[in-house]
Image (spheres, helix red, strand yellow):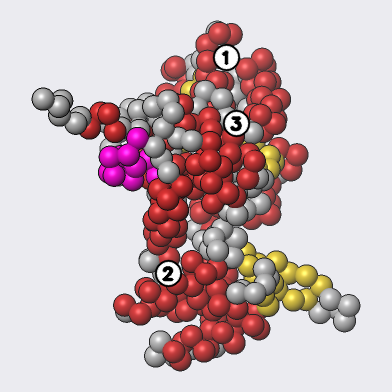
Amino acid sequence: MTAPHTSRAARVLKDPSKLSFDYVPEKLVHREKQMERLWMMFRPVLESGVSQTAFLIGNVGTGKTATSKRFCLDLVKEGTNMGKAMDFIVVNCRQRNTESSVLLRLVTHFDERFPDRGFSTAEMLRTLHKHLDRLKVHLVVVLDEADVLLRKGVGDLIYLLSRFDEEKVGGKASMSLILISQKYLLDMLDPASMSTFRRANAIIFDKYTTEELKDIVASRVPLAFYPGTVPQSTIELIADASGELGDARFAIEILEKAGMLAEEEGSQLVTPENVRTAKALTYNVVTSSKIEVLDVQKKLVLLAVARASREQAYVTTREVETAYKVAAEEYGERARGHTQFWAYLQQLANEGLVETKVTGDPSGGRTTYISVPDMPVKVLRELLEGMLGEQ
């Protein structure tokens, strides 16, 4: 009698948690230079007890958050070896975008029972001071997507945290600050905050090349998959599929979804067809979450950018506005005036859905050019047309 087929024989995924966005590898592939810069900046924190600030700047999926977490984990370990108590907290400012919610996250790290309302900013800062003084610990606060706070007018909090130890006389500093942003946010700070930061402390994270993405995917495969289940050709196809964006998150998500598809099929290999299907699914997941919350007018402006960008990397504001008026009429909406159209465009840029750059011309004028940074315009166009058609 033939033995019954077991699902284990067809499994390809050994440990899916190694493909999670929360997983931090022991070694970050192709982010060695950024780690070296951080160590250079923060070495005096360990050796002399001073405070430090740093900016990590780069597009989505360029390893900023993972690098900050890996660095902080290593910093705490090194601190332990040197007899210096270190701790860190990562705050996602898109989820916690008010002064009180960020401070509450810092305070509850040390006291889970701290009330979630009824305390002022000054009171929460005093409470945080007491915890750090009591524990004799140096805290590194990582504000991820810090530009969200600045756009919401919560820049005072960055100033307060950067000057956390200003009134302390003698003794060691108890807080350092790492800001993470897609945009260069030094120019967004008010003059008082600017005086605290050094431009030299900005660390740039460029988009990954296709070859770098191949190495990143290859490093995750043995951690997450059984041996021999992910051929080299599949790894290369994933790198090619995500190379246009230069986004490691996107590459790893394709790898994860392709693995899940292979398991659903009962296959013992992650095939190129699994990768192609996973890429299509992942594009929709990545972009839909940002785009579906836009109102109709912003969707129309974004559609206009996608349509105007069919044959060229950069398009002018005039070209986009013309395409916007056509799209508005097509979907039975009233096109807004130029001032409101421009405001929509800026809001889309703030969300990272489009990029704008201003250049001068020989006549002395200035032209704004618009581009779609993180996905093929054909995919964006089809996604928006589907959403607008359902409204």
Which label's residue is closer to the chain start, 3 or 2? 3
Which segment did they paint magenta?
258-268
Task: Give whichever of 200, 257 is nearer the camera.
Answer: 257
Tell me which amino acid carries mark 3: Val
* Residue 383, disc: 2
Residue named by callout 3: 29
Prevailing SS of the magenta stretch: helix
Secondary structure under the numbered disc 3 in the rendered image: loop
The location of residue 254, given as percent across then percent down, is 44, 46
The location of residue 177, given as percent across then percent down, is 58, 35
Tell me which amino acid carries mark 2: Leu
The location of residue 277, given as percent across then percent down, is 40, 54
Q: In the image, is residue 323 above or below residue 54?
A: below
Which label's residue is closer to the chain start, 3 or 1? 3
The quarter of the image holding the C terminus is bottom left
Q: In the image, is residue 357 above or below residue 331?
A: above
Rate crowding at label 3 as few (under 14), some (14 to 19) or many (20 or more) other CA atoms within 10 Å: some
The location of residue 267, given as percent across then percent down, is 32, 39
Mark 1–mark 2 distance (CA, rounded to whole Å): 47 Å
The quarter of the image holding the N terminus is top left
Residue named by callout 1: 78
Secondary structure under the numbered disc 1 in the rendered image: helix
Residue shown at the point (64%, 41%) measured from the top left: 211
Choose mark 1 or mark 2, whichever is in front: 2
Mark 3–mark 2 distance (CA, rounded to whole Å): 33 Å
Residue shown at the point (53%, 30%) measured from the top left: 219
Q: Horizontal placement of 134 versus 310: left or right?
A: left
* In magenta stretch: residue 130: no
